Image (cartoon, grey):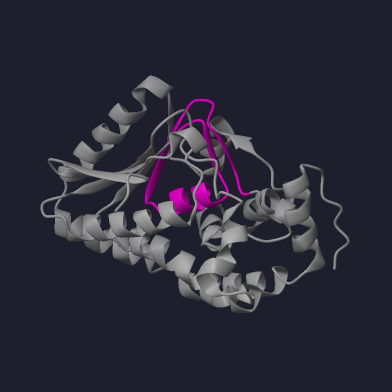
Amino acid sequence: MSELVKTKQRGTIFEIVLNRPEKRNAINLELYDDLSRAVDEAGEADGIRTVLVRGEGKVFSSGIDLTTFLLLPQKYGSHWQQKMRHITADFQEVLNRLERLEVPTIALLYGHCLGLALELALACDIRIAAEGTIMGLLETRLGIIPDVGGTTRLTRLIGPARAKELIFTARQIDATLAERWGIVNHVVPADALVAKGEELAAEIEAAAPLAVGMAKRVIDGLADLDRGLMLEGWAQSQLVNSQDFSEAVQAFATKRPPEFKGR
């Protein structure tokens, strides 16, 4: 594993740390592969009771590195847009494994947590944000949807009406509103973020591990996540072939606002 994601076990806490601070922890294919291996490490670690997910540098993560779209042909072939359901499933599978870890997972958010980064946070059981953290799912501004569990998990977390508002508008919101809407559990000063995560981990450790694990499975089993993920993949496979998506990519490359036509 490269150094783009670091892992460390501290007693009963297992840390997963995004480590691309010079790029605002933007998630490219290499970082995502490292994240996948880090999740496997957490699943195999002995004696852990919680997993903390955080970032290095000034922000948790600015989301997907948009140059990733330009590299998809190298991994999936020149006709990658016809394989979008398969590509989406590959991305979803990593966060599904994170969500299905037997132990509770806590995301520590600060600075910015956008797009795929918020989808990563939504796959964790609990989210703690530093004051002033900005969050949002920006995908509809690119002519696509949050397809790595974001649409499904956000709806499960805060309900259809608010999920629709955030996804339809691609609005960025601050930690205070995110807490009010139920996206994050706690908002704390930035210098208290790690301590709050460790404090919550200690509270969890005081409970019976088998009971905590079973409670997690029961709660997660109340929603039809698999159907939602399948629908995300189907929708994205249509959208990546749209003129609007092509326009969004070209607009990004030339640093201009996109002109969407609904085609």
Taking the image as drawn, is residue 15 in sight? no
Give the vertical position of 152 relative to 194 (above or below). Answer: below
Viewer-proximal residue among 128 and 25 = 25
Residue name at image x 47 percent, y 32 percent: 110
Viewer-proximal residue among 22 and 234 = 22
- Residue 79: which quarter of the image? bottom right
Give the left or right position of residue 235, taking residue 193 as reference.
right
Question: How many marks do you count on the picture?
Answer: 0
- Residue 139: which quarter of the image? bottom right
What residue range appears in magenta?
110-137
* Percent x, y of residue 69: 61, 59
Viewer-proximal residue among 134 and 60 = 60
Give the left or right position of residue 177, taking residue 261 as reference.
left
Give the left or right position of residue 167, taking residue 115 as reference.
right
Taking the image as drawn, is residue 190 in sight? yes
* Location of the C terminus (image quadrant): bottom right
Residue name at image x 57 percent, y 61 percent: 71
* Percent x, y of residue 97: 34, 64
Give the vertical position of 156 relative to 195 (above or below). Answer: below
Residue name at image x 73 percent, y 51 percent: 141
| 127 in magenta | yes
* Percent x, y of residue 40: 26, 61
| 86 in magenta | no
Give the vertical position of 55 relative to 261 (above or below). Answer: above
* Percent x, y of residue 53: 35, 44
Residue name at image x 52 percent, y 62 percent: 148
Give the vertical position of 188 relative to 178 (above or below). Answer: above
Give the left or right position of residue 251, taking residue 70 as reference.
right
